[in-house]
Amino acid sequence: MEIDLPVATVDFGGIKKKVDVSLVEANIGDYVVVHAGFAIEVLDKARAEETLGYWKEILELEENRVED
């Protein structure tokens, strides 16, 4: 969303957080894997969307498990 090196504002599904991007070469619009406040990998759009789909499935399964 916004980069002011070494910090970027990242959108986590509507939640905006500050992330250190000094370990990767990230640009606005890139998808990144974040661990402990650091972007550790830049993903291409297809891989990012695939990963987000898996997380969505996991959350749906968890919600269904809690309801049962």
Image: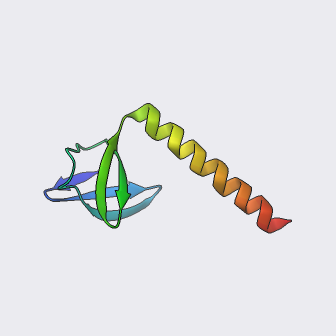
Question: Residue 28: which quarter of the image?
Answer: top left
List x then y, in percent, for residue 46: 45, 31
Question: How has the structure been colored for display?
Answer: rainbow
Occupied quadrant, residue 6: bottom left
Up-down relation of residue 6 to residue 44 (above or below): below
Residue 34 x/y as whole percent: 36, 57
Return the residue found at the far top.
46
- Count of picture labels: 0
Q: Is residue 13 left or right of residue 7?
A: right
Instruction: Determine the residue located farthest toward the right in the rendered image.
Output: 68
Give the residue displayed 78% in from the left and 59% down from the top.
64
Instruction: Locate the C terminus by quadrant.
Output: bottom right
**Residue 3 at x, y percent in the picture:** 19, 53
Q: Position of residue 61 (x, y in %)?
A: 73, 55
| Residue at 22% from the left image edge and 48% from the top image edge | 24
Q: Would you identify the image quadrant in which residue 62 lies?
A: bottom right
